[in-house]
Image: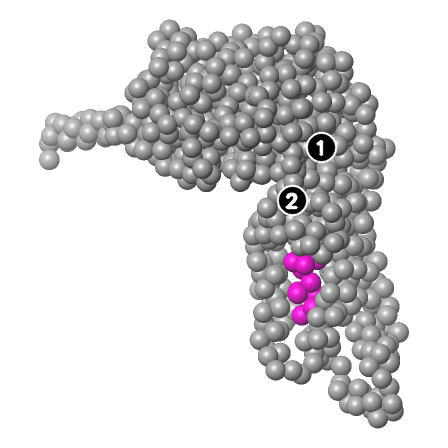
Amino acid sequence: MGTTRLLTIAGFAATLLTGTAYAAPVDLTLWHMEQPPHRVQRMKELLDEFNAAHPDIQVKQEPQSWGEVYAKAPAAFAAGNGPDLLFTIPDFTTVLKGIDAVVPVDDLVKDLDAKHGFVPATLAPYKYDDHVWAVPAYNMAISLWYRNSVLKAAGVEVPKTWSEWLAAAEKLSTDGKYGIGLPANKQLYTDQTVYSFMVNSGAADIYKDDGSIDFDKPATVNAYDFYSKLAKLSPADNGSWTWGEAEACFASNTCGMILQFGVINTYDTQAEGDAADLGVAPVPHADDQGESATISYSNAIMLTTKDEAKQAAAKVFLAWLMEPANYGRFLTMEPGLFLPVTGDGAKAESFWSDKTVTKYKGQVETMISNSQHGKLFGFTTGKVFPSIGAISAQNVIAETLQHIVVDGQSAADAVKGGQARMSEIAKK
Amino acid sequence: MKNTTLAFLFVSPALLFLLAILGWPLVQAVILSFQDVGVIGSQGQYVGLANYSAILGGAGFWRALGRSIVWVLGNAVVQTALALATALILNQKFPGVRIARTWVILTWIVPTVVVVIIWRWLLSSSGGMINPLLIQAGIIERPVGFFATRESAMTTLILINSWRWFPFTALMMLAGLTRIPGDLYEAARIDGAGTFQRFKRITWPLLQPTLLVLGVVGTLLSFNVFDVIWLLTAGGPSGATQTLPVLIYDTAFKGYRLSEAATISVLTSILLMGFAFLATRAMTAQEAAR
C-alpha cells in the first residue's frame, strides 16, 4: 500500500473519529428533590422531549430528598461526583456557594429575564456578591386553607387579623375536631409556619445590615406568643408533624384550618374534591399590621459544573424549560403547588389548561396573589449572610418554638435564647 | 510453611479489606478532629486540641451522653424483661411452640422504616388507634401526643425500640435456656422446689453467661441506634431524645461542623471501647472463677 493511500485512509479515519467525537452528546445530570412518582414521571416526559429535540445534549434526572441533600450534595462535590444541575432553595445555595460548587448564571438570567420577565421577589434571594447564583424555577407560598362549609357551619368569617383567627380557631375546636393544625416539630415546616407569623407581626428581618442577628425584638416575641396560643388548639402530636401530617389532618376534616403551601392535590384525590368548598386566604396578620404577608420560597436551579461544554448545554436546557409551552407543564408536575416565577409563565396556556389547575382556578389565583407578598428569612434586607444556611439547617426558628411549647418557657425568654443561638452559629 | 503462617495468609486479604473500609475512615475521623472543617468538601486548618477542649468543656456532649445512658439502660431493662418472659414461654412444650419460635422474630425482621411508619400511625392523636383505645379504657380523657413531652418521647422511643429488638434477645436467651440440663429441674422438682425456686436457683444463675454477653453486645448495639430515633423524633422534642449518635449527625450535617462531629465520634468510640474492654475483662474473670 502506497504512502499516499495510507495517509488518505488515515486522514479519512481521523475525520470520521473527529466527527464521531464532535457528535457525542453532552451528558448532563440533574438532581432535583421532587420525589413523588408523578413528579418524577412529569420530569421524565419533559426530559425525553428535550433530549429528542436536542440530540447533542442528554439530560438525565436523579431524584434526591430534601432531608438528605444538604449532606449528600457537599459530599458528592467533594468526591467529584456532583450533578451538573441542582434544584435549590435560597439557603441551600449559600451552603454550596461556600464550597465553591456553584457557577454564576448572570448572563443566562439576564437573557431569560428580558424574554420572560422574572417576578423580582423570586430572583432577589439569589442575587448577591455581585452575581446571580441560580435560575428561579417555581415559587411556593404559604396560605391559610379551610373549608367554606366548615366555617359557615361554625358561623365564622374567614379571619383576616390575629384576634379574628384565634376566635375562629376556638369556635372550630369542637369534640374530636381541632380548630387549626399547626406544627411544633423541630423541622423545616415549623420554621416556615412560624416565619409566616413573624412576617405578619413586622418581624421579617432576622439580620441587621451589618450581619448581626436581629431576632430578639417585641414583634418576634408577639409572633411566638400568638403561635403558641394557636398551637394549643392543634392535635397533640403536632410535635412530630411535617407537611404530610398537616395535609392529612386537613384532608380528613380533623383540622379546621391549616397553613400550607398547597393542599389541592391531596384535597382533590383524598378528600371531597369539591372545588367550591375549598377555601384559601392570605395568612392573617397581627392586629396592629396593615396587610398580610407570607413566607415564599423561590425554588431555583443551580449550575454546578465547571465544564464549559456542559455549562453551555445546561443553559440551552434551562432556556428550553422556561419557554411558556414547556414551563406550564413543568409547573403542573404538582398541580396547584408550584407557582410561576415569570410573567409569561403566569399566563401560559400550558399552565392554565391543566385539568386540576382549571378546576381550582380561583384557589390558584389566590395562591399566586399571596405569593406576591412573600418573604424568606435571611433574605429580606438585600444582603445575604452565609450563616443563614446553618441557621436554617439547624431549624433554630422551630427550636425556639419548642422551648415554649415543650419546655414551658415564656415567648420572651425563648426568643432571647433563639437570638443567642443564632448569634453563636453566625460567629462560627 | 507453618500452619499458622498459612492461616494468616488466608485471612490477610479479608483483614486488609477490613482495615481499608474500617481503619481508614477511623484514621480520617481522628485527623478531622484536629482540624476546623465545616461543610464536607471545604478545607480546614490544624487546630490541635481545640475541638476536644470545646466539646468536653461544653454542656451539649455531656447532656447527650446522659441521654444515651438513659436510652441504653431503658432498653436494657425493657428488652431483658420482655425477652426473658418470651424465652421462658418458648422454652416450654406446648402445641405450636415451633411455629411460635419462628414467628416471634417477626418484629425484628421488619425494616426500620416500616416500624416507624406503623408506630407513627398507631400513636397519631388524629387518626391513630392507641389514643381511642386509651380513652375507651378510661386511662386518658383526650388524645395525647406521645412525642410531645420530654419524658413521654424518650419512654415511647424506648418502648418502640425494645418492641423491635426483644425477639432477637429472646432467641439468644432461649438458646441459653436450652443448654441448661433438664435433669437439674427434675432433681429440684423431686426435692420439692416450686416454679419460682427453680427459676431463682437454676435458671437465673445458669443464664448469667448468656445475659452477660447479651449485656455487652446489647449495650453497644443500643448505644449506636440512630435510625429509629432520627425517624421518629429527630432528637426532639427540644433535644430530649438527642443521644450521642443523633448529636454527631446534627453537628456534622445540620450544623456543618464536621470536625466537631468527628471529635464527638472519636470521644464516643473511646468510651465504647473502654466499656467493651472492661466488660470483656469482667467476663473473663468470671469465667476463670467458675
Q: Which mark is residue A245?
A: none
Chain part drawn in magenta: B160-173
Q: Position of residue A3 (x, y in %)?
A: 14, 29
Find disc 2 in the rendering and name its residue. B125
Image vertical order of residue B160 relative to residue A74, above or below: below
Quadrant containing the C terminus of chain A is top right
Residue at 50% from the left image edge and 19% from the top image edge: A298
Residue at 85% from the left image edge and 33% from the top image edge: B57
Name the chain under label 2.
B
Find disc 1 in the rendering and name its residue. A232
What distance separates the C-alpha of mark 2 from that of mark 1?
Answer: 13 Å
Residue at 22% from the left image edge and 26% from the top image edge: A19
User: Given the image, on which type of amino acid does mark 2 rest?
Assistant: Ser
Q: Is residue A54 left or right of residue A126?
A: left
Determine whether the residue tagged by mark 2 lies in a helix, strand or loop. loop
Please name the colour scheme applied to the rendered image. one colour
Task: Examine the image and state in which quarter residue A350 appears.
Answer: top left
Q: Position of residue B123 (x, y in %)?
A: 65, 49
Image vertical order of residue B27 relative to residue A348, above or below: below
